[in-house]
Image (cartoon, rainbow, N blue to C red):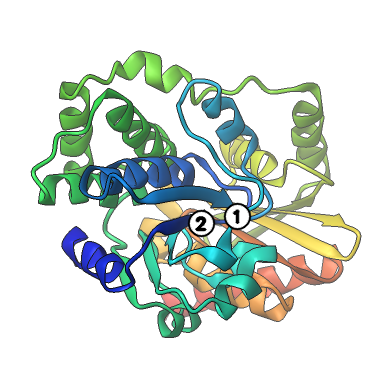
Amino acid sequence: MSFTEIIKILDEADAKLIVLLCHHNADPDAICSAYAFASLLKRFKPNLEVEIGAAQGISRLSKHLLKHLPIEVKTQSNVENADAIVLLDTNTIQQLNNLAEKVKASKAPIIVIDHHAAHPETEKLAKLCITNEKTSSTCEIIYNFFKQMSIKPCENEAKTLFLGIAFDTRHFILANSSTLKTIAELINAGVNAQEALSLLSLPMNFSERVARLKACRRAKLFKIGEWIIAFSHVSAYQASAARAIINLGAHVAVVAGQKNETLEVSLRSTREFYEKTSIHLGRDIAKPLGEYLHGMGGGHSTAAGVNGVGEIETGLKRCLRLLKERLVLTQN
């Protein structure tokens, strides 16, 4: 799949306004890939109006990055008037939350660009799906568009692409040889790696520290085979708490939190757990858990999230059952 196919769709639609949408609580890979993609589009279509939007806002780290990057994210996306819609780092319509129905109702062509496999429902809606699970991030896919068109990114474009890749690879821990080659090329394009990486270090506030400590204190541990699996719950910062539990020694951490009737679950695992069991948290655990909780779930091999409806205990029990079932399969 190539960038020229996207341009062809925009030409056929006689697009004047294109809306780029990121998933709810948009992370740095989402907003940075949207910015770089918008910049590349403007190289070929200078008169095109490009708007970046995120369902129900962006993450705390993304807000921090926006203080240092020339990225504007609209709080109210103009989906109704869009001549084309592009979903970036968003493989399911459900990840658009309050914008999902507007996108479904739109007659504008929908394009999906993501490093996760597209959801079947999204594939039916989309005119074009450009997905590649072998790439580290959506930013890496966008950088490949620059290369396809023989365009060297400017300093700001290179910086945003670098930051998106660094975030999704956990500062290159999950990077493969292709990703590292891309990083080297972005540094050659003018990125100060040390300065850029410092932007991804968000100081931990008091509430996050307390949430991490509470999650560790409340953790229930299960030993399944050689694996230590921890379950806990806190009212906020579930993802941060799950990472903390992994850092303390668990192979898998599942932390839930409830806001009114909404249940949020963050899942993390070590790389070793994924490599030895082939259990992909996003595909094998979060997705079916999300369906069970009448919501949605997805993510990466070692980091995933679920939003649904129900009680914390119910969600965690179901998650434990899913993990046990998958681990039994790996042992056979």
CB under 8 Å between callouts 1 and 2? yes
Q: Residue at x 84, y 71 (%)?
A: 310
Local crowd size for mark 1, using a 10 Å CA cut-off: few (<14), some (14–19), many (≥20): some
Q: Which tag, 1 or 2, sits closer to the chain's start? A: 2
Q: Is residue 295 left or right of residue 192?
A: right
Residue in the foreground of this view, choosing between 9 and 144: 9
Return the mark for residue 77.
1
Please state the horizontal and vertical placement of residue 318, each as a whole percent of the image.
72, 74
Residue 146, picture quadrant: top left
Q: Secondary structure at mark 2?
A: strand
Residue in the foreground of this view, choosing between 267 and 21: 21
Quadrant of image for the C terminus:
bottom left
Please state the horizontal and vertical placement of residue 193, each as a whole percent of the image.
31, 19
In the rendered view, tell whether residue 203 sits above or below residue 310: above
Q: Residue at x 27, y 52 (%)?
A: 141
**Amino acid at pointer 1:** Ser
Residue in the foreground of this view, choosing between 267 and 188: 188
Q: Can residue 166 be seen here?
A: yes
